[in-house]
Image: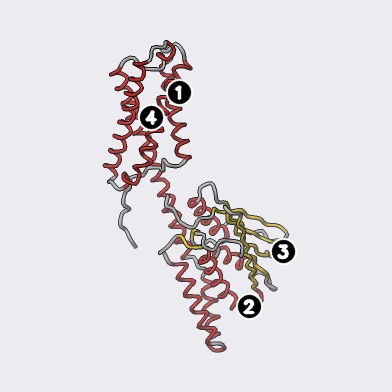
């Protein structure tokens, strides 16, 4: 086991995205409102004061976002303390530059209405601006750090659950597979050799920690290997229909999405039925979202318990999809007319981008 402490990194959001820009606008507007309220009733006109504060804060916020957008890669290469100090200095300096520019523009104005939008006390205005920029920037950077640490902890927990899921190959499946292979060594040695290779490939895929993301083609191949092993034991009782021609095989997905659900479908749907049944694995693609569904028959009047293997696998898959695509991926469960179905939807991407 690797007990090496995790290296600490400087965490900074991607200010190049529209979502981050919107967040900055909302934050600076909130600060502008608070400053305006705090200054009343010293100011005669609340709305003029709010307009001036909003314009001033928006300029600072948007310029800071643009600078941090361009310098993120450079800052993240520094140590945590160094990057934190540089970022804080950049934000304060930008605030002071904007404040000085606003003051100088105000000195050129002579209209009485516009005079109310500009400061008249130079040093006090700059000092107050620098202090507010320092406090707000420090709080924002601290929030970003705590948020990133929380997300990292959630991801580590998810990885631990993945390892638990990888190690949770049911003992009965292993014992049954080994017994099947043992019987085949006498009646069909060539087929037994193929089964051993399939079992080795399945264990290698389930227990490997090399990659947490694989292509959809690789993920489906792992599920097919599992199907071939179970087919040796269940024979004609197990039928699997693959309707996946419409999904892009180059799409990247978190590993172990389909095989655990196929395993559950066999365990809960096929094994209890003396006549067996058909599992259907289908896929669809609308140009943006990939839809995968796994459906299996259930014994008559059967209600799937929440805390069985189905629940463990589904909770794990749901959490990993949410970590991979927050707010964009879903896992839906349906049970009707003796059919249990798990439907996964997630965005299509061919290159994994670390958060």
x%, y% of residue 303? 66, 58
Q: Is mark 1 on a helix, strand or loop?
A: helix
Q: Is mark 2 on a helix, strand or loop?
A: helix
Q: Is mark 4 on a helix, strand or loop?
A: helix
Residue at figure coordinates x 53%, y 77% from the top left: 177
**Are the two marked residues, 2 and 1, in contact with CB atoms closer than 8 angstroms?**
no
Residue 279 against residue 41 in the figure, above or below: below
Q: What element carries label 3?
A: loop
Which sits earlier in the primary sequence, circle 3 or circle 4?
Answer: 4
> How far apart are labels 3 and 2 at the CA level?
22 Å
Which sits earlier in the primary sequence, circle 1 or circle 4?
Answer: 1
Which disc is residue 235 wearing?
2
Which sits earlier in the primary sequence, circle 2 or circle 4?
Answer: 4
> How far apart are labels 2 and 4 at the CA level?
69 Å
Between tags 2 and 1, which lies in front? 1
Q: Name the residue under label 4.
A: 60
Residue placed most toward the observer, 318 or 268: 318
Which disc is residue 300 wearing?
3
Which disc is residue 33 wearing?
1
Using a 10 Å C-alpha cutoff, classify the residue at mark 2 as few (fewer than 14 neighbours), some (14 to 19) or many (20 or more). Answer: few
Between tags 3 and 4, which lies in front? 4
Residue 264 against residue 23 in the figure, above or below: below
């Amino acid at each position: 086991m690797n007990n090496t402490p995790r290296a600490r990194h400087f965490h900074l959001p991607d200010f190049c995205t529209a979502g981050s820009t919107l967040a900055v606008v909302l934050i600076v507007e909130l600060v502008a409102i608070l400053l305006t309220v705090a200054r009343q009733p010293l100011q005669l006109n609340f709305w003029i004061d709010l307009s001036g504060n909003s314009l001033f804060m928006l300029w600072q916020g948007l310029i800071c976002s643009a600078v941090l957008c361009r310098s993120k890669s450079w800052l993240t290469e520094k140590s945590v303390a160094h990057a934190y100090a540089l970022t804080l200095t950049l934000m304060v300096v930008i605030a002071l530059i904007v404040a000085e520019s606003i003051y100088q523009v105000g000195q050129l104005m002579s209209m009485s209405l516009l005079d109310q939008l500009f400061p008249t006390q130079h040093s006090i205005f700059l000092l107050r601006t620098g202090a507010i920029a320092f406090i707000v920037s420090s709080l924002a950077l601290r929030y970003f750090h705590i948020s990133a640490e929380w997300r990292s902890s959630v991801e580590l927990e998810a990885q631990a659950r993945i390892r638990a899921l990888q190690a949770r190959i049911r003992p009965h499946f292993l014992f049954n597979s080994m017994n099947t292979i043992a019987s085949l060594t006498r009646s069909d040695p060539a087929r037994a050799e193929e089964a051993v290779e399939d079992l080795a490939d399945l264990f290698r895929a389930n227990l490997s920690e090399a990659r947490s993301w694989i292509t959809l083609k690789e993920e489906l191949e792992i599920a097919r290997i599992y199907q071939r092993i179970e087919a040796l034991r269940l024979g004609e009782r197990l039928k699997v229909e693959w309707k996946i021609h419409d999904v892009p095989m180059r799409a990247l997905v978190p590993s172990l999405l389909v095989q655990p659900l196929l395993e559950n479908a066999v365990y809960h749907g096929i094994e209890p039925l003396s006549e067996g049944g058909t599992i259907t694995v289908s896929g669809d693609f609308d140009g943006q979202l990939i839809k995968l569904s796994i459906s299996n028959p259930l014994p008559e009047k059967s209600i799937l318990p929440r805390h069985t293997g189905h629940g463990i696998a589904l909770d794990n898959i749901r959490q990993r999809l949410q970590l991979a695509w927050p707010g964009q991926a879903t896992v839906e469960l349906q049970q009707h007319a003796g059919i249990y179905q798990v439907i996964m939807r997630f965005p299509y991407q061919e290159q994994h981008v670390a958060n």
